[in-house]
Image (cartoon, rainbow, N blue to C red):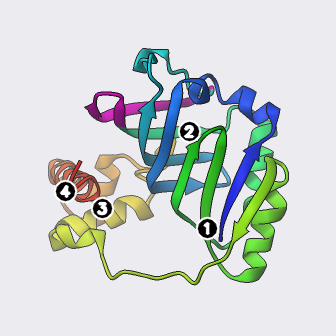
Amino acid sequence: MIFDLKLNPLLLKLGGNFMKHVEHFEMLELLRLDIEKGVKVLLGEMILKEGSKLSDIRLPKRSEFTVLKEDGQKYILLITGRAPNWKILRIFKSFQADVIWTTPTYWKDEKMTMSVIGAEDELKKVLRALKLMGKVNNIRYHKPVYQEHNVMSVLTDKQKEIIIAAKRYGYYDYPRKIDAGKLAEKVGVSKATVVEHLRKAEGRLMGNILAGY
């Protein structure tokens, strides 16, 4: 399902001045979505309006970004966003549905276009939740087409084993449920080995995801 969303004034206000200075923003990859904790981590491409600078951008409270690549007014960003208060967290939790948020998802001309994959009943849950955010227009339905591509294929077997264990035991949770030392005990190697494998695995995954940028 692909649809357009016009945000309500409250969410526009909570969005800081991001939308004031951005000509176009597109999600490239959703890396993490924790509905219960109100946490989202994504890679995105941002094009600033003429006359705007990166230093002008103020994200909503409890959100931050890291610049991965800069090309004139175009930036590739790693963005971490957290629900700024309980009211927004309540809206966030209303999106508890068995769906996949995917691309194309972008912001342009004061309008969001979003894409989600799921069964009909689950998509209906999403549409009900979206009413809390604003007005939904121009809903389109398409049969999803999957391409065979495994981002983990760039890792060695050991890197794959350790990074999967890190995810399973909460190393990437916020806050972390386990540190590198405890994770090392779980997988039966030294702490230095765990840190080295994670560093290399993260570097390879990021290089694969951002290939071409």
| Separation of residues labelled 3 and 2 (CA atoms) | 23 Å
Q: Secondary structure at mark 4?
A: helix
Residue in the picture at 60% in, 38% down? 82
Question: Which segment is the magenta one?
Answer: 61-75
Determine whether, in the image, residue 27 is placed left or right of residue 180: right
Locate the N terminus and report the quarter of the image it occupies: bottom right
Among the two numbered marks 4 and 2 on one chain, the one whose residue lies closer to the N terminus = 2
The nearer-to-camera label among 3 and 2 is: 2
Mark 4 burial class by Cα count in 10 Å: few <14, some 14-19, many 20+:
some
- The percent position of residue 212, horizontal first and vertical second, equals 21, 53
- Picture disc at residue 204: 4
Residue in the picture at 47% in, 82% down? 145
Assess whether residue 74 is covered by the magenta stretch.
yes
The residue that disc 1 covers is: 116
| Separation of residues labelled 4 and 1 (CA atoms) | 27 Å
- The percent position of residue 206, horizontal first and vertical second, equals 26, 52
Assess whether residue 6 is covered by the magenta stretch.
no
The nearer-to-camera label among 4 and 1 is: 1
Whether tag 3 and tag 2 are in contact, CB under 8 A, the answer is no
Among the two numbered marks 1 and 2 on one chain, the one whose residue lies closer to the N terminus = 2
Taking the image as drawn, is residue 97 in sight? no
Location of residue 83 by image quarter: top right
Among the two numbered marks 3 and 1 on one chain, the one whose residue lies closer to the N terminus = 1
The residue that disc 3 covers is: 163
The answer to whether residue 9 is above or below residue 167 is above
| Separation of residues labelled 4 and 2 (CA atoms) | 24 Å
What amino acid is labelled 3 in the image?
Ile
